[in-house]
Amino acid sequence: MARPSAADPHRVVIVGGGFAGLNAARELGPDAGVDVTLVDRHNYHLFQPLLYQVATGALSPGEIAQPLRAILRRQRNTRVLLGEAVDLDPQRREVRLGDGGSAPYDSLIVACGSTHSYFGNDEWARHAPGLKTVDDATEVRRRIFVAFEAAEREARPDLRAAWMTFVIVGGGPTGVELAGALGEIANDTLRRDFRAIHPPDARIILVETDDRVLPPYPPEVSRAAERQLRRLGVDLRTSSRVVGVDGDGVEIESGGVRERVATHTVLWAAGVAATGFVRRVAERIGVEPDRAGRIAVGPYLHPAGREEILVVGDAAVMQSGGRPVPGVAQGAIQSGVHAARIIRARLDGEQPKPFRYRDRGEVAIIGRLAGVTNVPWLGPLGRQSGFPAWFLWLFIHILYLIGFANRIVVLVRWGWSFFTHGRGHRLITGENRLPEIDQPQPVDEPAQASPGVQRQEREESE
Amino acid sequence: MARPSAADPHRVVIVGGGFAGLNAARELGPDAGVDVTLVDRHNYHLFQPLLYQVATGALSPGEIAQPLRAILRRQRNTRVLLGEAVDLDPQRREVRLGDGGSAPYDSLIVACGSTHSYFGNDEWARHAPGLKTVDDATEVRRRIFVAFEAAEREARPDLRAAWMTFVIVGGGPTGVELAGALGEIANDTLRRDFRAIHPPDARIILVETDDRVLPPYPPEVSRAAERQLRRLGVDLRTSSRVVGVDGDGVEIESGGVRERVATHTVLWAAGVAATGFVRRVAERIGVEPDRAGRIAVGPYLHPAGREEILVVGDAAVMQSGGRPVPGVAQGAIQSGVHAARIIRARLDGEQPKPFRYRDRGEVAIIGRLAGVTNVPWLGPLGRQSGFPAWFLWLFIHILYLIGFANRIVVLVRWGWSFFTHGRGHRLITGENRLPEIDQPQPVDEPAQASPGVQRQEREESE
């Protein structure tokens, strides 16, 4: 074998411990004869497809996250570094870390995923959090459940309605699953939990630019999803765009008409952009990123002229069989594994194989016992909706979840929720635990100027 | 029955949804013929005795917390208010909330527990967080695991040692359990997780003013606990006081001698003080609180001359059989239930019974498979240590945990940890995820001025 000697092994640096990076690291086990350094800003691997379940109080963060060190403990050739990759020196072959340290490489795998894009309106981020990290999820969870608490305390009908309005921007899988979960929360979970408000009165608006939700799926799958969302009371706004977001509402444009919706809870599930590190890599190696900031790679997953830098997952624009590889978990997992195999093949003096994406299909669930699937290789059987889709989703997600205890615990949680309709994890944590219900009151309505218990009691006794 | 009519029921306001408040609310079910309003700053009831397990990554917050609304859903006479009680108007019989609202009462139960006391050194709080809320626990968890990450990245031995030093202030049950869990983390959980550091080298210092840990327990129980802590490598400093805390270390005084210990991780498990609301209540009704700010109550749980205000749990100084009731979960539960029974008896025109505390004993665990118990009514059998104590602890805590799914999930977690020695919930979340390893470097040591991977690699190859 043409491998480097054990005293001076080939050094692989992987930036990012998500689906792509973690699977690359696993494929580069001790038998690969390489030294691996995995750099991540978080100390855990996150099962992102279930993050919306944390945001909606169905699961706890620890149930879908696993410490990277624990996962990679047995790979003695692998070092995990908690740190942020901020720059690249392609000549010295070094990744620069935010704290002044650096990680030298012979091969680099860029697997740092993507972040949200607010389409140039970064000031919206404050009012419309996205869903990428555990902290995002606990923040979204806080906002959702604080909104119901504030509505319970609010006496003025218009202000109460604003608290009970939820706008989700983006009709992809995350947006659809969030809308479905919110529908379930309002209609089912919280149904009997309040005294002054009736949670099923909540208004859930899903805004999507395309003329249907789940645009990458076949049209009949989108239609099934829309049917199920409507059944949960979700107000679907397809062919619509959000053109303004502030603390008191959003502006929605549809067919040239603008409408203002009063709300305090806007959730962002649209727009993908590469992270700052990917943009910096593109700059340093002199390639032009695409509009989202991602780096285009060829069949061997490296940008033109830079064999030692492999870009995978959401950070890359990848092709397979002439078609773009979708930005889903499977694309990340498969490209991460393949990047590792390319490095191994080269060290073994073999010709690496070009990357081929195998479409395993997509599954999304929509509230309780319902969902849609699109699994091409199963033929017509692969397009399910309703209960079979829900069941398939459950099976796949349990299977892919990392950590045996987490699989059992999540099964217990789901089994329990199935029978009790409960969501036990709806904790409101963080700094702004208490709803700010002291809205500025118009001067000409003094009778309604003091929200609170007494006001509500008066209302209820009428 | 002498109950008020259904149209104008007796209004009970309970401030605090901890052990005392929640148990009072449960005792005042729909059959009590009263209107209950439960006010809490959080939307969940927290099983505080297990909070240190969240802080040490063994459990997730959602596994020991349950939404108050969900617990009280079926009690249609009970309203839950997310809000902070800030003031009292004893003449108008109203509790004032922080957001301008108010809650009028006929009977008031003050059950808002206690907070930390830094003995007049409030500036220590920033460097030495306590353990009262879920946010406290995730903050302590962040600090513990960031410290190991920072040590892994730090090349200078003295700075690395500071990161691997943990000081716990207070040798009561919380301090002892924290020290035990930290010992387990260092010796067991993280043993093989790092490459540059050896986690069992961590130094865990437990500081207690008294001459033994667990001062309220019998001396032989303290001795057993100390034996078990030493076996885990915990450095016990009894008859010692912390006299200074800053970002780089603590000052410990023992027998007139002061010692400075360099550390970045100080955990506060000492000192109990009443919350601001309790102090305000004392002021408004003109009673003198004790040094910790708590209100002394008689056998019917009200302060002198104020029958309609009942103070329970950690907010009160209670007596039973001439002896003070200890500030433990059982004291809170029993006094909360009893306060509700006093109100019911009065409404029924009956003479309420005086409060009698039944000492059910205490149990503490110390790391893996070890602990101490002190259960007086079991006689000599009630004083166990080691494995029997650990097993009894497990049984009692599962039994008292609220929520059936949580009981199963926590059992699965513990069972799994038992076999794998794992702590899957050691997520580092929040703003300061990344360790700040950029210590100011002395000018005369330029060779060691750049910590990072490269430095560590050089060290390891020596």
Image: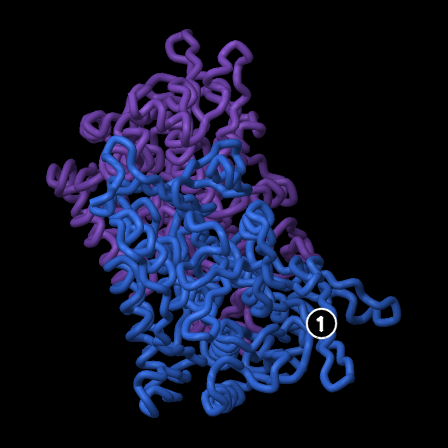
Chain colours: A purple, B blue
The quarter in which the C terminus of chain B is drawn is bottom right
Q: Find numbered disc 1 in the image and state the secondary structure of the residue it sits on.
A: strand
Left or right for B378, reference B364: left
What is the x, y in percent for residue A457?
A: 35, 28
Which sits in the foreground, B267 or A111? B267
Which sits in the foreground, B357 or B52? B357
What is the x, y in percent for residue B418?
A: 34, 77
Question: Which residue type carries mark 1?
Answer: Val
When asked about the image quadrant of residue A318, the answer is top left
Q: Is residue A169 visible?
A: no
What is the x, y in percent for residue A166?
A: 38, 28
- The answer for which chain carries disc 1 is B
* Rendered residue at 40%/72% (across/down): B422
* Rendered residue at 15%/37% (across/down): A386
For disc 1, the marked residue is B250
* Rendered residue at 49%/24% (across/down): A450
Q: Is residue A379 visible?
A: yes
* Rendered residue at 25%/64% (across/down): B408
Residue B351 higher or lower than A226, as above or below: below
Which sits in the foreground, B331 or B255? B331
The quarter in which the N terminus of chain B is drawn is top left
What is the x, y in percent for residue A138?
A: 44, 46
